[in-house]
Image: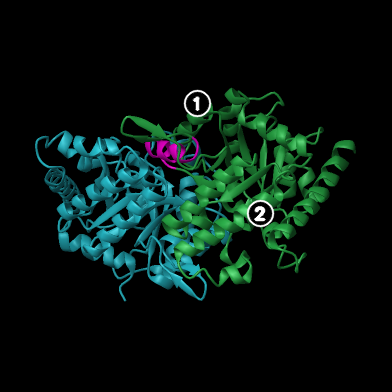
Chain colours: A cyan, B green
Amino acid sequence: MELAIDALISKIEELDNPTCVGLDTCIEYLPQKWQEKCGNFEDAGRYIRDFNLGIIDAVAGIVPCVKVQIACYEMYGAEGMRAFADTISYARQKGLIAIADAKRNDIGGTARCYSAAFLGRAKLYGKELPTFESDFLTVNAYLGSDGVKPFLEDVGRYNKGIFILVKTSNPASGELQDRKLEDGRTLFEAVGDYVMEWGKPFMGKYGYSSVGAVVGCTHREQAESLRKRLRGLFFLIPGYGAQGGKAEDIAVCFDELGRGGIVNSSRAILTAHKNRFAGMGFDEAAREAALLMKEDLTRAIRGKANG
Amino acid sequence: MELAIDALISKIEELDNPTCVGLDTCIEYLPQKWQEKCGNFEDAGRYIRDFNLGIIDAVAGIVPCVKVQIACYEMYGAEGMRAFADTISYARQKGLIAIADAKRNDIGGTARCYSAAFLGRAKLYGKELPTFESDFLTVNAYLGSDGVKPFLEDVGRYNKGIFILVKTSNPASGELQDRKLEDGRTLFEAVGDYVMEWGKPFMGKYGYSSVGAVVGCTHREQAESLRKRLRGLFFLIPGYGAQGGKAEDIAVCFDELGRGGIVNSSRAILTAHKNRFAGMGFDEAAREAALLMKEDLTRAIRGKANG
């Protein structure tokens, strides 16, 4: 069976597109007429779901992957979580790779429950069932390796992947992450070095591990140095577009073969029908925006690979 | 209106009990006959909910607070999340203070959604509604202050509280948290110092802030030094009982008036009907275990306050 990271990289190569559509679907992103129907959690869940399914249909065959930000769904309670589940499941059904962006973290026994929810199987009486089965999950490692281990076990057991927060894209990410340790490394480098260790048992045929790192592209020099330091770690790269990251910033996250990362864009794709491609349907507009993003990024990454 | 931290401390004083029952309800904790009925997510959600409601009824009037570990519910999907919502809401209805233990974290815009789910209000068309409305939420601050800010805003706006992970109770917590920084502080001290800053606008009448810290009692010396360092930060203290923390270890987390923290116990209370008080109903057993815990801890803390 193909490792999760190999499936992701193969899909990126097949579509020649290292990008990922972020389904951080807020009701403000929906067409006005749908928004107006979101008067309770059930309807919010339903219209968000329908919007996502439309986006997935529109970008399938163009982008290899979606990243679904669970916070946007959790906000609408059980009904929102149903929309989250349907979105993940529909994306996978359409051949897209699904990243659950949940940044989960806890002590070992509890992390096991989180891992069961997204990567493994939930325990019932005499049987086990998948819940929000995803291909990858984002994880926060502040608790240390015994909090990460349950996820690693499921990566092995169910052939899944995780992306661990190393250097995030937000403006204040440096407050803790950039702190210099006594040994001269920054905290984010120390976390990255742990992720390298954790990832070793899951190396795939392209030289990358199913255990990867979240590295924002909004802090270019740090991303560049991390690309050199963390050989074999695949990067999930937020920060492109609305957060200020540009294609040239992102190119530094890729290796000499133009591999090594996947770039997320949410707002520019989901709100294309309200901005750049106003007048088009939300799905058609998302498709156009996804094509533009592909072009923008592949040009920059190829430029670097050839340069 | 009373600050969240003042309500918590008042309730602790009223019941003379600085403990908290952790509703980390796994199906293995249920009475055997109930477990056998948990063959799908809907039934698992229902029996976990009923178990929790029984525990809440049994401990109301003895313990001031419950901490509900969301991972145990998320594992059962939308049905599990409904059980989580019902548990939080029933506990508050019974006059208990409810801590949602979710360790949420993300960049600002996304953290806003998490905060809306647990502390604030979810945005619908033309209105806002609470989702999993809790009194306190646990938060992971690895992303830095802009990721924490949305929670702080809701602490102010809706009179809620948060507990930020400073030093966790798990064995490997030191891998990152104990790292020495260039300036001589450990990482957990640096996080604690930030929490002090963030908490300043929310100081209550007992000299503690509605923005507190998670400090495990399994690393006694560190807990003791944090109690001295982080004056004004109320501690949520995991690690007692099954994780190895003893009453004497916990006493160091309290101030000279016997205030300053709340100690969580999950397994010993929830599984009392299978262990220490086998033969009793799960609720009656939980009540007995909660009384023992109260006695064990108040003796140790009072011993310290008087000593």
The type of residue carrying mark 1 is Arg
Amino acid type, mark 2: Ile
Question: Picture quarter containing residue A285?
Answer: top left
Q: Quadrant of residue A38?
A: top left
Secondary structure of the magenta portion, mostly? Answer: helix
For the record, the magenta segment spans: B106-119
Q: Which chain letter matches label 2?
A: B
Which quadrant: the N terminus of chain B?
Answer: top right
Where residue B131 sits in the image (x, y, percent)? 45, 41
Q: Nearer the viewer, mark 1 or mark 2?
A: 2
Residue A287 lies, with reference to residue A6, above or below; the image says above
User: Rounded to the nearest whole Å, what is the CA distance between mark 1 and mark 2?
Assistant: 31 Å
- Vertical comparison of A1 with A160: above or below: below
Task: Return the disc, 1 or 2, that comes first in the chain's sequence.
Answer: 2
> Horizontal placement of B288 versus B82: left or right?
right
Q: Position of residue B104 (x, y in %)?
A: 48, 45
Which picture quadrant has residue A172?
Answer: top left
Classify mark 2: helix, strand or loop: helix
Res A225 seen here: yes
Q: Residue furthest left?
A: A279
Bin the neighbour count of mark 2 within 10 Å (Cα to Cα): few under 14, some 14-19, many 20 and up: many
Q: Residue at x 58, y 68 (%)?
A: B34
Residue pointed to by mark 1? B157
- Residue lying at 36% horizontally and 43% vertically, measured from the top left: A41
Where residue A99 appears, as percent x and y from the top left, is 33, 56
Quarter of the picture containing the C terminus of chain B is top right
Is residue B113 inside the magenta stretch? Answer: yes
Chain letter of the residue beneath label 1 in the structure image: B
Q: Which residue is mark 2?
A: B55
